[in-house]
Amino acid sequence: MTDGPDYGFDTLQIHAGARPDPATGARQVPIYQTTAYVFRDADHAAALFNLQEVGYIYSRLTNPTVAALQERMATLEGGAGAVCCSSGHAAQIMALFPLMGPGKNVVASTRLYGGTITQFSQTIKRFGWSATFVDFDDLDAVKAAINDDTRAVFCESIANPGGYITDLDAISAISDEAGIPLIVDNTSATPYLCRPIEHGATLVVHSMTKFLTGNGTVTGGVIVDSGKFDWSANDKFPSLSEPEPAYHGLKFHETFGPLAFTFHGIAIGLRDLGMTLNPQAAHYTLMGIETLSLRMQKHVENAMEVAGWLETHDAVEAVTYAGLPTSPYNHRVEKICPKGAGGLFTVKLKGGYDACVKFVDSLEIFSHVANLGDTRSLVIHSASTTHRQLSPEQQEAAGAGPSVVRISIGIEDPADLIADLNQALNAVR
Ligand SMILES: *Cc1c(COP(=O)(O)O)cnc(C)c1O
């Protein structure tokens, strides 16, 4: 496809990054199942290794199938470049890696995917990094948490397990003022519902495992760089602004401008951390993204109908879906995700922990799995599974207390979903 800045989302989700294969004319993006690429000659090889010419060397770094997906994701998010990696969690580490160093910290929202809270509160300590968690509705607390060693602010657009929408404009105003990048995990929203860069995000990360692939077949992640952050404005990001010893003294920002973060992510991040997406996974994700807008519209439509119905059921104490007028975050839908609040929410049952377990076990169409963003409707009791490693306070703050079941609404017939939920709720009573 030739560059067409005016193409709409539905066109770009199919065409961005994809061209007929130069060797065969294959219309679909081939799976380039190869580890290495033959150099034209020794000069060509040297130019590639010096980053003087862009091309393929070794699939830990770059691969044509993965490159097509990177270009598609950068386009859909409105970014300058993107780096794919092996999972959403890999994307988070890869996003922080060029920014952080021993003694540096990230200021993160309390409302995050459970695995991210564990990764940030425990595992990153081994790198000498730390995280400070704050309520991102308390803007003064966010400001107060940022200190001289803060290198990033991190939140989710629509937060997993659902029902909360971050005021990205208010948060990016704070990170801008502090001269540090805002990283937004846009997994639950996808670029169809929310485009964080338009709200001031520097980097957008995704678990492509979820709605982007959309059918529960792939583990993958991506970091999209807005290309808008000035890494040289202060001395906080030497790996991007100063000579980088890990790449024979190359100054990434000076050399690559708005693509500095992307080149760093490939040339150092993937080279040395090795969290590479494999080409077959990239192919499946490209297939999934072709229908992203259609699926997200249906996820939103179904979630509105099912959440609205659940709210009226007398075994239900509360439903946290930001799309419902009763949600305290409903007013943020128009501003942050005007096409809808996604397909993910939680339901709180009057019967507490035991009722949740019985409810989950009684469902037939809904599968009890540790996943979300599938064409299939899924449920999980977060407190006994994904959020199990968290303290009771962390569980409550993340919206995953013991009486709460997380629901990921699929694209089935909504009447069938409601009938299934109804029989399971009746079984609880
Ligand atoms: C699943 C998920 C992740 C982690 O992604 P993986 O692909 O499982 O590593 C991160 N953030 C959010 C919001 C998620 O839902």
Image (spheres, rainbow, N blue to C red):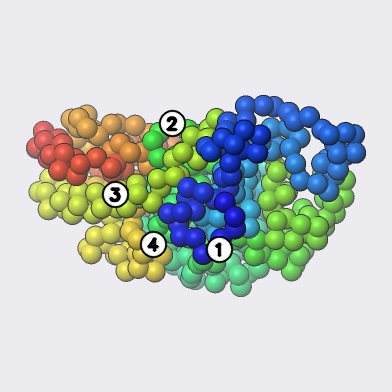
User: Which quadrant: the C terminus?
Assistant: top left
Marks 4 and 2, how far apart at CA: 26 Å
How packed mark 1 is, by other alpha carbons closer than 10 Å (few <14, some 14-19, many 20 or more), is few
Amino acid carrying label 4: it is Cys
- Separation (CA) of disc 1 from disc 2: 31 Å
Q: What's the residue at 60%, 58% (across, down)?
A: 3
The residue mark sitting in front, 3 or 4, is 3
Q: What residue type is labelled 3?
A: Lys
First in residue order: circle 3 vs circle 2: 2
Of helix, strand and loop, which one carries label 3? helix
Residue matched to label 1:
5
Label 2 sits on a secondary structure element that is loop
Question: In the picture provided, is 5 more to the left or to the right than 373?
Answer: right
Residue 240 visible: yes
Label 4 sits on residue: 337
Residue 217, label in figure: 2
The residue lying toward the viewer, choosing from 291 and 357, is 291
Q: Which of marks 1 and 2 is nearer the N terminus?
A: 1
Residue in the image at 88% along x and 45% along y: 248
Closest to the observer, 40 or 67: 40
Residues marked 1 and 2 touching at CB (< 8 Å) = no
For the point 59% across and 64% down, which residue is it? 146
* Amino acid at pointer 1: Pro
The percent position of residue 135, horizontal first and vertical second, equals 44, 60
Q: Which label's residue is closer to the chain start, 1 or 4?
A: 1
Q: Mark 3 points at which residue?
A: 298
